[in-house]
Image (cartoon, grey):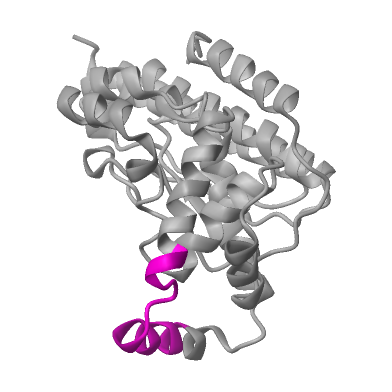
Amino acid sequence: MIEASQFKIGYKTYKNLLKQTSTEISKNIGTKVEIIPTSKKICKTNGIEKEAANSINTASFLEKVYLLLKNKGYNLPKIYLDEEQLPRKYNIAGCQMGNFNIFGPARLDVSNPSLVIHEEGHFLHKKNMKYNQPLYAMFCAFRSLFRPFLNKKEKQILTNDFKRAYDEGYFRNLQMDKCVKKGYITKETSEKFKQTPEKFLVRNALTNVSEFIAEYFTLASQGFKFSPEIEKRYKAFHGPEIKELITKDEIDELMKYKNMLENRKIYV
């Protein structure tokens, strides 16, 4: 059991280390990055060094992905890593809010570049709106009550597109086994996924316009070609412009980097 005085010193060092890392990454990618310290309670339970590794290694991974997006010509949001905003018990890896994206620092081992690209799609979509955002949100909510954003035929086409994307290897970096091991999904769900992966993969895209845009952007930015009917819908909802494509080799390099970070120790 670590003594209270030692923990106090270690926790202070941990906070300073996060502040220093935030400053360095902010400078490197050209947008504000803030890493919020994990609570003292969690640090006492899991150990300061483990939580420091969660925060700093996840930040390093985000830095690498966002540098790639920047080099492809995309504007970047502010980035927050915050355990309080996204408690690990809720199993949420990331979300988009205003001019910044929020990520949970404890989800590096089951994450992949598509998670980060997806949240970038949300950010760019909001920036791309020709409407006042609150009014546009009200419009989408009103419209969804009376008219689906995709009709029955388009939903089937989109499902088929996701099956084709899966078959072509665009979802090769899903961390299904790790998700089962961590308790994020059940083994039964994993087995059902293997039988009809497209039904699971398309589910989020069918939720609403915003998720449809982010899912489309994630795949299209990596070179996947959607059916004409789906591309037409994407453009109609002011989906972000697809710029220089992210290649398979670049995604693979990001995954190698992520896997290295999972084993990187941070000493406090």
- Against 151, residue 245 (above or below) is above
Q: Residue at x 53, y 10 (%)?
A: 264
> Which part of the image, by quadrant, shows the N terminus?
top left
Q: Is residue 214 visible?
A: yes
Q: Is residue 181 above or below residue 54?
A: above
Give the image quarter of residue 114: top right
Q: Residue 133 location, x and y as percent?
A: 54, 83
Q: Position of residue 144 (x, y in %)?
A: 35, 81
Q: Is residue 209 left or right of residue 43?
A: right
Give left or right: position of 92 versus 160: left
Q: Which residues, given as a range, are shown in magenta? A: 137-154
Q: Main secondary structure of the magenta part?
A: helix
Q: How many marks?
A: 0
Residue 95 seen anywhere in this rendered image of the structure: no
- Of residues 52 and 186, which is closer to you in this image? 186
Which residue occupies the foreground of this view, 68 or 223?
Answer: 223
Residue 131 position in % (x across, y down): 61, 88
Report the front residue among 88 and 110.
Answer: 110
Q: Is residue 264 magenta?
A: no
Q: Quadrant of residue 258?
A: top right
Q: Is residue 64 above or below residue 262?
A: below
Residue at the (32%, 48%) spot, across then down? 84
Q: Residue at x 46, y 30 (%)?
A: 111
Q: Is residue 88 above or below residue 262?
A: below
Left/right placement of residue 251 relative to residue 68 reads left
Q: Nearer the viewer, residue 238 or 48?
A: 238
> Is 141 colored magenta in this rendering?
yes
